[in-house]
């Protein structure tokens, strides 16, 4: 980064104010990122995420599960009617 030339103290003050605000913005982003990470790693959120993942897996494979289980249920019911 090259050196910048200023023609007045007002320009320097303006640049310093901009840098100060940018520093504050970056600090707030860092704090927010830390808080989100801390919340994401809390036991409650981890359990909720795990249950959400399991629910998604079960609901997305619901048809496959039914297709696998229904033949066994039908066979069990037909054997039960025959007295086996």
Image: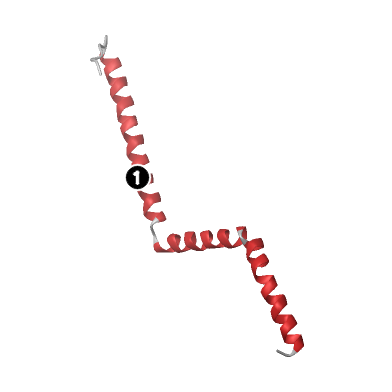
Residue 17 location (% of width, % of height): 31, 25
Mark 1 Cα shell of 10 Å, populated few (<14), some (14-19), many (≥20): few
Query: In which image quadrant can residue 42 be found?
Result: bottom left
Extreme residue toward the right, this view: 81
Residue 46 location (% of width, % of height): 43, 60
Extreme residue toward the bottom, this view: 83
The residue tagged with tag 1: helix, strand or loop? helix
Q: Is residue 43 above or below residue 36?
A: below
- The front one of 22 and 46 is 46
- The front one of 25 and 54 is 54
Query: In which image quadrant can residue 27 be found?
Result: top left
User: From the viewer's perspective, is 13 left or right of 61?
Assistant: left
**Residue drawn at 34 percent across, 30 percent down:** 22
Extreme residue toward the left, this view: 3
- The front one of 52 and 6 is 52
Q: Quadrant of the C terminus?
A: bottom right
Query: In which image quadrant can residue 80 be found?
Result: bottom right
User: From the viewer's perspective, is 40 left or right of 14?
Assistant: right
Residue 13 location (% of width, % of height): 28, 20
**Residue drawn at 35 percent across, 48 percent down:** 34
Q: Quadrant of the N terminus?
A: top left
Identify the image's colour scheme: rainbow, by chain, secondary structure or one colour. secondary structure
Residue 45 location (% of width, % of height): 44, 60
**Residue drawn at 72 percent across, 76 percent down:** 74
Number of numbered discs visible in the structure rendering: 1
The residue where tag 1 is placed is: 31
User: From the viewer's perspective, is 82 left or right of 20?
Assistant: right
Q: Is residue 77 above or below residue 46?
A: below
**Residue drawn at 67 percent across, 67 percent down:** 66
């Amino acid at each position: 980064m090259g050196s910048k030339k200023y023609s007045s103290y007002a320009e320097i003050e303006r640049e310093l104010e901009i840098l100060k605000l940018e520093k504050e913005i970056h600090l707030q982003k860092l704090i927010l990122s830390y808080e989100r990470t801390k919340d994401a790693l809390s036991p409650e959120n981890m359990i909720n995420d795990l249950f959400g993942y399991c629910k998604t897996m079960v609901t997305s494979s619901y048809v496959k599960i039914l297709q696998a289980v229904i033949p066994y249920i039908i066979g069990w019911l037909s054997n039960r009617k025959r007295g086996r």
